Image (spheres, rainbow, N blue to C red):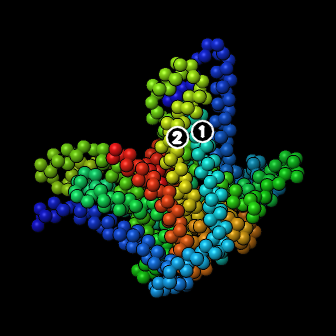
């Protein structure tokens, strides 16, 4: 008995976690998927009704706004964070004596809760008393910066705060990438008298393709899951001008009592994430096996 | 390290000096950009409301007052209650501490079993557990809310602890597995020949080697759980909310006069634990971030 136990101990030890993920990940996804195919409202109903919730979802003006916002926010957030992170990494990679301190400063926002980040930026972007008032106080009395309360521009305030939070992290990724490059090739190029900017554009940046890819996947993942930041910064408003799929899902689930819409929007979010993550994981795993 | 600017270019010695200054100037500008929000939060929290209304966002406080800090800790209102952040701060502490410890322990044992006892199917089980890291949690929110209700854990701190442990196992298993996989498997083989058991090998051989990865995992889990908002706001009720939810309620409370200084003090208080961890153990924090980034 004891030897049987000992022989199977690794499996026994893993079994609870295995069962937990079967139930709480796969089972729960299955439940949500099923609810998304029913007419559930306030209470779950289990009789199948096809894709009716998805039809409602795609006809919803609010969901349409949320998806549009996700693309605007996601695109700008990813592009700006990547460019800024790359520039910072290159600047920091020039044998800076105080690199440790500077890196700590650039990266600390990543340790903050997005609620804290949202609260801080909400105050800075406050039109009456924040940045706008500060610039007006300097004498430029017609200066206007009302993005936070302007439905057309409010989504860009989410980009501003998001980039502030995540760009230091992208810098850390690129810095690690720069440090692992083959220095011999770069030295050889220098000896050949190739100008520095050419070394960057033709040798260094192209050889960091995999870092670009991981940065993209991480940032896209963050963008799709963005919930806290929107809640703290704009609450999804003005109106639903800054709604994202995550806030739409939450509103349907907990304020509107519309389980069918909550479930179908959550499923769409998961499919968007999988469309990005699965090919990435596949290529990563294949690269390891080769 | 690529080193262009330090490379002497004999024809233009002044050029290097200028480049060097431009470089430091740029780095300083970016440092100001990242520090500015924290700076604004701190100075705003030290001003009186009167000074906030009349002064400028970035001007230093004329009379430093800690009133806002006191109010944030014990008096700030969220909704109808005015008890400050203190009770919610402790909610977060008693939620995060057990959740971090339990999920780290489970991750350590799991990682050890997967990486060092490669039985048939171990990798498949690992992949299945790891998958939980990638899902948007929105997809489990509804069934979890129902299950917590059925279990009588709805709106309770034990319920939140359970949720954080369950969805933390993927990461903690990943961290320990990736760490243990670099340790030669011969170690376990030799210990087995000596008659040591599964747990004996874990506790006397592997655990003593694990301090760095334990630190990385604990920091990662603590930051994730302390900063979590989605689970907190979905599965708590008045009185059991974690600090992030309480902070959001205070800041977005629509009753009474808007007290920006109290909002900022509250935000700093909510951020202090993770900021302290970052300042003290930044190296491990970054290691966790980059290890966690592979998962997305």
> Mark 2 — on which chain does it sit?
A
Give the vertical position of A102 relative to A233 (above or below): above
- Write down the residue under mark 2: A174
Q: Chain of mark 1?
A: A
Contact between labelled residues 1 and 2, with CB atoms less than 8 Å apart: yes
User: Which residue: 88% across, 52% down?
Assistant: A142
Q: Nearer the viewer, residue B177 or B196?
A: B177
For the question of whether residue B267 can be seen, the reply is no
Q: Secondary structure at mark 1?
A: helix
Q: Is B71 or A288 nearer to us in this picture?
A: A288
Q: CA gap, disc 2 to disc 1?
A: 9 Å
Q: Residue at x 65, y 69 (%)?
A: A64
The mark tally for this picture is 2
Residue A29's x, y, as percent? 44, 71
Q: Earlier in the sequence, mark 2 or mark 1?
A: 1
Q: Label 1 belongs to which residue?
A: A88
Residue B108: percent from the left, percent from the top?
32, 55
* Image coordinates for residue B130, horizontal then vertical, percent: 38, 59
- Residue A170 in view (yes/no): yes
Element at label 2: helix
Residue B159 rendering spot, x and y as whole percentages: 44, 73
Q: Which picture quadrant has residue A193?
A: top right
Residue at x 58% of width, y 77% of height: A55
């Amino acid at each position: 008995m004891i030897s049987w136990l000992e022989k199977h101990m690794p499996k026994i030890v893993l079994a609870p976690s295995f069962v937990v993920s079967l139930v709480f990940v796969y089972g729960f996804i299955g439940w949500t998927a099923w609810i998304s195919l029913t007419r559930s409202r306030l209470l779950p109903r289990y009789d199948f009704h096809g894709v009716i919730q998805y039809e409602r979802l795609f006809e919803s003006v609010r969901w349409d706004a949320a998806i549009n916002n996700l693309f605007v926010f996601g695109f700008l957030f990813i592009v700006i964070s990547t460019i800024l992170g790359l520039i910072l990494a290159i600047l920091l990679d020039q044998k800076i004596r105080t690199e440790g301190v500077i890196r700590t400063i650039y990266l600390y926002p990543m340790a903050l809760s997005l609620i804290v980040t949202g609260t801080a930026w909400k105050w800075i972007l406050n039109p009456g008393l924040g940045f706008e008032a500060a610039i007006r106080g300097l004498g430029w009395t017609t200066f206007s910066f009302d993005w936070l309360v302007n439905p057309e521009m409010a989504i860009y305030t989410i980009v501003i705060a998001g980039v502030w939070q995540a760009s230091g992290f992208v810098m850390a990724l690129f810095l690690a990438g720069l440090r692992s490059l083959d220095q011999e090739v770069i030295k050889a190029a220098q000896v050949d008298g190739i100008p520095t900017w050419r070394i960057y554009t033709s040798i260094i940046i192209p050889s960091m393709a995999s870092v670009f890819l991981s940065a993209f996947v991480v940032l896209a993942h963050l963008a799709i899951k963005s919930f806290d930041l929107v809640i703290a910064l704009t609450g999804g408003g003005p109106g639903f001008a800054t709604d994202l799929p995550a806030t739409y899902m939450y509103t349907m689930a907990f304020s509107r009592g519309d389980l069918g819409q909550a479930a179908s929007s959550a499923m769409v979010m998961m499919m968007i994430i999988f469309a990005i993550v699965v090919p990435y994981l596949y290529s990563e795993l294949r690269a390891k096996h080769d | 390290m690529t080193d262009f600017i330090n490379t002497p270019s004999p024809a233009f010695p002044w050029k290097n000096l200028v480049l060097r200054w431009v470089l430091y100037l740029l780095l300083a500008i970016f440092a100001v950009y990242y520090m500015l929000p924290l700076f604004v939060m701190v100075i705003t929290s030290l001003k009186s409301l009167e000074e906030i209304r009349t002064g400028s966002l970035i001007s230093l406080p004329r009379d430093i007052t800690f009133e806002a800090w006191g109010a944030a800790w014990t008096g700030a209102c969220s909704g109808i209650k005015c008890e400050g952040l203190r009770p919610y701060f402790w909610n977060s502490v008693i939620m995060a501490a057990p959740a971090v410890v339990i999920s780290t322990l489970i991750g350590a044992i799991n990682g050890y079993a997967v990486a060092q006892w490669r039985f048939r199917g171990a990798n498949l089980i690992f992949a299945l557990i790891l998958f939980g890291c990638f899902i948007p949690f929105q997809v489990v929110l509804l069934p979890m809310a129902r299950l917590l209700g059925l279990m009588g854990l709805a709106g309770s701190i034990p319920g939140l602890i359970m949720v954080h442990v369950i969805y933390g196992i993927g990461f903690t298993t990943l961290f320990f597995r990736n760490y243990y996989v670099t340790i030669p498997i011969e170690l376990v083989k030799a210990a087995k020949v000596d008659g040591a058991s599964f747990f004996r090998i874990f506790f006397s051989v592997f655990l003593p080697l694990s301090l760095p990865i334990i630190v990385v995992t604990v920091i990662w889990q603590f930051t994730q759980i302390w900063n979590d908002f989605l689970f907190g706001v979905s599965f708590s009720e008045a009185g059991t909310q974690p600090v992030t939810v309480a902070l959001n309620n205070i800041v977005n409370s629509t009753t009474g006069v808007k007290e920006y200084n109290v909002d900022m003090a509250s935000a700093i208080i909510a951020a202090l634990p993770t900021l302290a961890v970052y300042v003290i153990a930044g190296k491990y924090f970054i290691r966790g971030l980059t290890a966690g980034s592979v998962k997305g």
